[in-house]
Amino acid sequence: MSGTPHNLPDGFDPVTLEVIRMRLDSIVEEMGIAMIRSSGSPVITEAGDFNTALFDPTGRIYAYSDYVQFHIGSGSVAVRNLVKAIEGEQLSPGDAFISNDPHTAGASHPPDTNVISPIFHGDELIGWAQSQAHLIDVGGMTPGGFAPGAHDCYAEALRLPPGVKIFERGEPVEWVRRILLNNVRVPALFWNDVRSLVASNNTGIRRLLATTEEFGLDRFRDYTKLSFELAEQVVRDRVREIPDGTYTAEEWTEHNGHVDELYRVACTMTKRDDQVTFDFTGSSEQTDGFVNCSYGALVGSVASAIVPILAWDVPFNEGVMTAFDIVAEPGSIVNPRPPAPISNGHLTTGARVSRVITKLMNEACRTSADEVIRDRTQGVWGDSWTGGISAGTTDDGEYFVLFNMDGGGMGAGAQPESDGLDCAGMMTQVNNMLPDVEMNEMLYPVLYLWKQLNVESAGHGAHRGGLGLRFAWTLHGAQEVTQTVFAPNAQVPADGFGGGLPGGGSGHEVWRRSNVADLLTEGRVPGPGTLDSAERELLAINQQSVAIRDGDVLVQWIAGGGGYGDPLLRDPRLVAADVRDGYVTEETARHTYGVVLTDGAADEAATTRARAALREERLGRSPERPVPADSPARASAPRRDADGWHVQASGARLGTGDDWHDLAHKVTHVAADRLAEHGVRVRPRTDGWKIVIDEFYSPSCGTLLDARVRVDTGTS
């Protein structure tokens, strides 16, 4: 494997190096535990939407907790911008600074609030403790901090730049506290969460000081510096195993909150030796909708993809990301200037950044001579959070804001050896958690009617993409709420890889004036097959101020991950098990996988005939080369050797050029229509640019080699 062991410099002990490294990891994890135990917000306690970290005095990362990866970028930018903002000011133990402004403090969006505390060893500043969490409400025009209707950042939230001191020498700065609480809808919950962030930092400070006392400050610094260098070396060694070259890819953000348009996220990756540059020049200009991605979220979204692909086993510190440079034009959708609104940029455009990096790394890694690097390819994840925020007054007169963290139930991309995880979360969510039904029902006036896997979401393939979540609730203890929704993965789904098909999309409906009360009175379980309604209202991709009343039902479905490998290479026994378990229908098994079932088991002879017929249908003629029935999933991804490109499944040749696609048999379909044939739901576009799927087949054996989602702008 690339990244061979490195000898330590003279005078360094490997045991001490590992003890200090693991001590730092345990400290940031303990900080997270302190936050969870002191917070009253289910966003923190149930869903884990936070991060904790330790930094050196200049803002380099000592250690980072495994909760939300894109906070790597926002947390780092927040600390570094704070250091610049307060240069020359007097600092004391017990101080703490609060910030949430994406434009000046690097926050992913305004609800993601940073509290940063200095760490002193005697009179010397030796680092910073940083805790960041999504707070339920931060003011602005819409409860919950997401503002689809905002045209500028001033409407979204109370903006806190770096340098706002919230605690001084261990005591709250009272006038700052009063201003904050006067501008949020749930002041008690807000202040308790701020205190939990401070408590998290205090835990980290105590534990870090104990560590420096144990090992000595100079020794601690020497070993952490070495940890930076070793992490960098391992990552650079792996980068070297990727062929030098220039790679391009694009993704598209949907609907900016005002208009149903598409916004381009373009990236050119240049790899030379052990350095990679990601250049986002060519991305759309910033818009007046809430989908602009802050620079901090951009950095974090790049890291969200890079870390699991190339640094999956490397303890995260400053050294991990040094091999990667990021270029982004100011004023673009990936690096906006004020007054661009930004409250959902990280979950829309930021998630598209992670997806485009995954696509770039797939293309780069697939031609590596290193088998381990080749196996870092994958189906694209169903990233882009599908959200719902409910606000209103209970029957008891209590005002509430519910930010439903069930929105994290999107499917992961399939892998070379396995199906993608169901309800895995976004790629950035290392420790994704979904809230308990009982917890949400206890805290908020909602009653869940169902919570199940969305069988219309998986990207089919030799390995299936993970399924998303599908759930529904009705009000129980309130007469009406105002709902904000966003479903940014509705129209442009996640790509598969190596012949895997794209996953399904996301969305919301309100089933108006349902018979839910009658069913409950009769003792019958309300479900998709028993619930009737006077109207089923499909909500816009992004929409606010939706009234949901007693008797209405909110239904939400979440995107799935892309598949890996041609579906005709999936083991028929797995397809039969999928049908028995309800993951796919018998019709999909036959039409998509070419598997014929008899008494619930795969009929071997009938399946062989069905798959041969599907290959002939793909090409419009009989294939020239057979494909062995036991070909593995990765066999449909073309490989390059000294003689050029070839199809692993059959040995068919695809030419000697740089790109094999020109020699493949290409078929193009409208994405929503084509995926519907496979039982996968994607929202059709009715106006403007079309979203299509380009399918590339081996002209010799009919193997599906690639299925790419593309936005047809009419210029290519």
Image: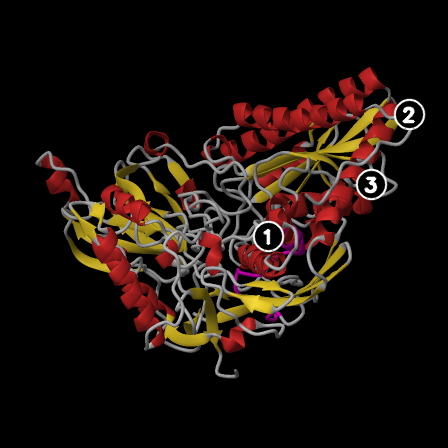
Give the alpha-carbon distance from disc 3 to disc 2, as whole Å.
Answer: 26 Å
Q: Residue 58 shows which numbered tag?
A: 3
Magenta residue check for 158: no
Residue 266 seen in this snapshot = no
Element type at marker 2?
Answer: loop
Residue 228 percent across, percent down from the top left: 79, 38
Magenta residue check for 284: yes
Label 1 crowd bin: few (<14), some (14–19), many (20+), radius 10 Å: many
Q: Amino acid at mark 3?
A: Thr
Label 2 crowd bin: few (<14), some (14–19), many (20+), radius 10 Å: few
- Mark 1 or mark 2, which has the lower sequence index? 2
Task: Please say if the residues under marks 1 and 2 sit with CB atoms less than 8 Å apart.
Answer: no
Q: Amino acid at mark 1?
A: Arg
Q: Main secondary structure of the magenta part?
A: loop
Identify which residue is drawn at 30% across, 41% down.
451
Element type at marker 1?
Answer: helix
Q: Residue 374 shows which numbered tag?
A: 1
Which residue is labeled 2 in the image?
Answer: 11
Q: Quick check: 509 left or right of 518? A: right
